[in-house]
Image (tube, rainbow, N blue to C red):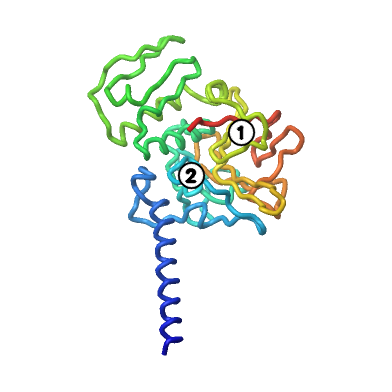
Amino acid sequence: MIMTRTIQTIVLLSYIISLVTFGYATTRAQGQIAYAWLDTSRHSEDIVQRIPPPEGFERVAVDTGGFAEWLRCLPLKPESSPVYLHDGRLKRNQTAHVAVIDIDPGTRDLQQCADAVIRLRAEYLYSRGRFDDIVFNFTSGDTAAYVKWRKGFRPEVNDSRVRWIQKAVADSSYESFREYLDMVFTYAGTLSLERDLPARRSITELSAGDIFIEGGSPGHAVIVVDMAENKTTGKKVFLLVQSFMPAQNMHVLNNPNDHNLSPWYSEVSGDTLITPEYHFTPVKIVYFPE
């Protein structure tokens, strides 16, 4: 009898733990506060649930509530989902991704590579109520602060000069926030991100939330959304997410260099990072200060 009750207790505890664990992951992936764009009426798997680390690796510890945790729990569209362009057409290349992030690409050709990075960072800050920290610079160097936008100020751009004029009523809605981001996408890009963000000295300093970037017209940028480590060897691997041109669904990239490790990446070849649709040469890594 005692053994039977012990077994029943163990089973019950295991069931409760599984519910708590699943519920926590689901809350992080679907909570409206965490991911304001997400329709919480549908269940979305997140990156942690869908993509296990390679054999022998464990996901690195991250701060609760931090950008790294928020990124690794990004919701995903169902398995085998294709990548669509902003206008609803299928992207021609459907071989570059292993998963599609469950986030809209917008309806205009704006949310491209650097814009996707900006969107993710801004959405994270928005989810944490850190509105004062939602600040990006235009390629011209002019500052675009979300708190000013919320108050009804709008940029007036004449040639290379920017003035902020109050043209609208104060609006703190999510819809207005998305309009702010579309405005930032219009005037910011890889050049401004590369110029304004601090750089890592080495890939050994790599962390989730870091950006591989090559500033230019257009240049390119991909963001590290998760990392794992082999505790025995100390070797680290990482996952990358991108948007591309034209504006399209953000997606987790496969690794064209190592199909056994894919979608995880482990090394930079010489001074080049090879991704399915872009080669970063030389490699430059920048990051958002917390």
- Outermost residue toward the left in this view: 169
What amino acid is labelled 2 in the image? Answer: Asp
Q: Which numbered marker is on residue 201?
A: none
Q: Are marks 2 and 1 in contact (CB under 8 Å)?
A: no
Picture quadrant of residue 127: top left
- Outermost residue toward the right in this view: 270
Element under label 2? loop
What amino acid is labelled 1 in the image? Answer: Phe
Q: Which of 74 and 28 is in front in this view?
A: 28
- Outermost residue toward the front in this view: 2
206 on left or right of 118: right
**N-term mark: 2 or 1:** 2
124 on left or right of 82: left
Element under label 1? strand
Q: Which of 186 and 269 is in front in this view?
A: 269
Residue 266 at x, y = what percent? 69, 45
Residue 212 at x, y = what percent? 61, 33
Residue found 57% across the figure and 35% down from its top: 210
Q: Nearer the viewer, residue 120 or 181?
A: 120
Mark pair 2, 1: CA separation? 22 Å
Task: Give the residue at mark 1.
Answer: 212
39 on left or right of 99: left
Residue 51 at x, y = what percent? 56, 55
Task: Give the residue at mark 2.
Answer: 63
Looking at the rendered image, the disc whose residue lies closer to the viewer, 2 or 1, is 2
- Quadrant into which the N terminus falls: bottom left
- Outermost residue toward the bottom in this view: 1
How many marks on residues? 2
Residue found 59% across the figure and 22% down from its top: 217
Picture quadrant of residue 213: top right
Q: Height in image: 140 above or below 85?
A: above
